[in-house]
Amino acid sequence: MDWTNYRSPAFDELIGADGGPRPAAGHLIAYLSKLSDRDVAARQVAASAIARVSGITFTVYSDGRNVDRPLPFDLIPRVLARSEWERTEAGLKQRIRALNLFISDVYGEQRIFKDKVVPAELLANSVNFRRECIGVKPPLGIWAHVCGSDLVRDADGKLYALEDNLRIPSGVSYMLENRIVAKRVFPELFETCTILPVDEYPMQLYETLAALSPRPGEQPVIVLLTPGVFNSAYFEHTYLAQAMGIELVEGSDLFVGEDDCTYMRTVYGPQRVDVIYRRVDDLFLDPEVFKPDSVLGVRGLMRSWRAGKVALANAPGAGVADDKVVFAYVPKMIEYYLGEDALLPNVPSFLCTDEGERRYVLDHLGELVVKPANESGGYGMLIGPRSTKKQRDKFRKLVVADPRNYIAQPTLSLSTVPIVTPRGPSPRHVDLRPFILSSSNIYVTTGGLTRVAMKRGSLVVNSSQGGGAKDTWVVDLEDAS
Amino acid sequence: MLSRVAENLYWFARYVRRAENLARLVGVGSQLQLDLPRSVKFMWQPMIDTVGGAALFKTRYPDAGSAPADVDVMRFLLLDEGNPSSLRRSIDTAREVMRSIRDTLPPQIWEVVTDLHMFLEGDAERLVTRRHRVDLISRIVDGCLKISGLVTATVSRDIGFQFMQFGTAIEQADMTTRIIDAGASGLVAPRKEEDRETFRNLQWMAVLSSLAADQTYRRYVRRRVTGEHALQFLLQSDTFPRSVYFCLTRMQRMLGAMPPRPDVKTKLDSLVDSIRSADPGALVVKNPASFMDEIQLELRELHDAVAGGYFNVAAA
């Protein structure tokens, strides 16, 4: 593989500005350089074949039917140095501690609003604030047990937090599967470099969930609640349930008894359930409280949860902090609740609710990225430098009409990692989604899921919009042999 | 084991076994038809009745009259999406049922079911003609047997496996009574009186072979095929795996590995008694149809007891 003509338009994760490999990627680049084009192509084919056989898919609805599509996998891993990762990990732990304290506060005393650190109007207009959760004290005071935070690296080489997914973040199964594929394709490298393992995640998740059981001391009954086979993340639901050895249940498999306990219907009769890792949205969880026509949830589940008879992860209402406007206040939350400075910087955000900032946003639409507060999947965004005048006019109207629903951020250049193309290595933009587990301890995945925009120049990494994935290596340089 | 998963495993096994029996039955009918002299007519109607589709067949093929064309019957029994008892619907239902429990079964099983589904959706129509019919039937039977083989060779022997085996056994018992029914109601209609005896035995031979029992019958019974002996073999053999008695006693043994449900045991024991005390000689003289109907009804009640005991777990 020839790197002489490799040039990135941004900060590249593997190759430095001088054209040589970054220290953590040294082994990898030396190894890849020795492979012929045919070797590389053969390994890419092998990697895609392994990925396909293991069933790494996401479901998309197209042409009136559901199709399981393989997630494009690129051979070349993204590499991070252990020292940098440890700093990032500390920053992520700090963030999630503050976010959990914030959610507890929102549904408790609301001190942060009374102290005017965060404006109270934020709640009034939040689509993910759940009145039904006020006064509830979930086990260990934790609401967001599983968090997927998206990190991006800008031209200055620093990692920034872009958003925190606190509702039902997905993608961790791809991280685990990508590693299995990489080990099969590059066994030699796993021998010579110290690449830290990622495969303890399912066990860590199991322990995170087990710690929430309302019947401590007994072997907890833990289940994963899925919306069913037609959900885009169904592959991940079965994957995690199998990896943890727990039942994969649908709403109709559960019921809430007169004793407010939650049970599942088994061939042995009703069996009490202690912890539910739910992958169903808040509003579909319980037709008694939320959407009355939901068939995905369980009637009475909120009653059972409020009575402390069953634990839900993530807790209903945790999404109140998963809002791009709330995001802008995370550094202030860290200061307010923990008395610390944020270790991991936020991508700077302009709040359209603030008159001065809104005017700036409207005057600079051509340079900024404008995002709706509560969309996910990369939908409904304006990428200023690539927009047409018509699109900018449309967003101008949207922002003026509903300033609470929009934030703007400078257009980051997003770092790149090379992918394999028929014409040699070529840079593509990436982000990084580590997963953070919180209960009695906080655990952060080693690295995370690297999502890559497979189209040249594209900044959109979402799988629903043509994104792919790479394995992510955290490499210990001190331990290199 | 979740009730939903157990129920889906049970139905998956039932639909696969149903499809296999249906394919065999149609296959034998179409072979038999070739053996008959012009003076003897092959009757498709009993086959349509076997799956309970008489009324529906009339509405789907209003011009068929009393002696429907074999291509129409073939299409109706095998490929018709509008016929809930067609082979195609059995395979499609098996596939739909498996979709939500895919992770509990080896992936190869899904591949075989999907392959059958695609085959019936695509190529099958072309193969309905007499010339290719054998290929069509054997392709389907092979697919179903491959699934059964994968189940016994690769599925772990947990409680879910018991429900699959139970589903297979109850479906086979039911299909065996239905196929006996079809045979007894006269698959052939000789025009000459002196042919009657010859062809009656020929049709019992067809019944045996549609249950893959012809060779085993010869080895164990060692007599020329008569209605009485065929009936005795298919109802009461304790070694032939598709006999009603065998299927029922197999279920009795499985109950030991399943959570106890008195209703299921009572129902099953009474079914075994009915079969054991049946008199094949007398049945064959007076027409076994009503006895078979009784057994089918009892099997239905057995299913209801299973569903009530294991699948429909209500709030206590």
Image: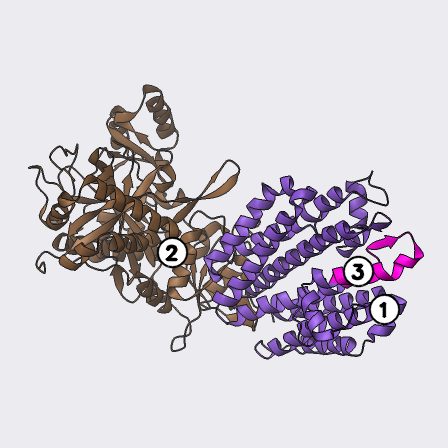
Residue A60 lies in quadrant: top left
Query: Are discs 3 and 1 less than 8 Å apart at CB?
Result: no
Chain that bears disc 3 = B
Query: Are discs 3 and 2 less than 8 Å apart at CB?
Result: no
Q: Quadrant of the C terminus of chain A?
A: bottom left
Chain that bears disc 1 = B
Which chain does brown denote in the image?
A: A
As shown in the figure, which amino acid type bears the numbered disc 2?
A: Tyr
Q: Which residue was labeled with disc 1? A: B284
Real-space Cα distance between discs 3 and 2?
80 Å
Question: In the rendering, at what x and y percent does residue B199 appear?
Answer: 83, 58
Which chain does purple denote in the image?
A: B
The label number, if any, that marks residue A22 in the structure image: none
Question: In the rendering, at what x and y percent does residue A393 appear?
Answer: 35, 22
Real-space Cα distance between discs 3 and 1?
15 Å
Q: Earlier in the sequence, mark 3 or mark 1?
A: 3
The label number, if any, that marks residue A107 in the structure image: 2
Chain that bears disc 2 = A
Badge 3 element = helix
Real-space Cα distance between discs 2 and 1?
77 Å
Tell me what residue is drawn at x 54 percent, y 69 percent. B161
Badge 1 element = helix
Does the magenta portion include A189? no
Question: In the rendering, at what x and y percent does residue A233 appear?
Answer: 42, 50
Q: Which residue was labeled with disc 3? A: B202
Q: Observer-nearest residue: A71 or A314?
A: A71
Does the magenta portion include B185? yes
Where does the magenta region start and end?
B179-207
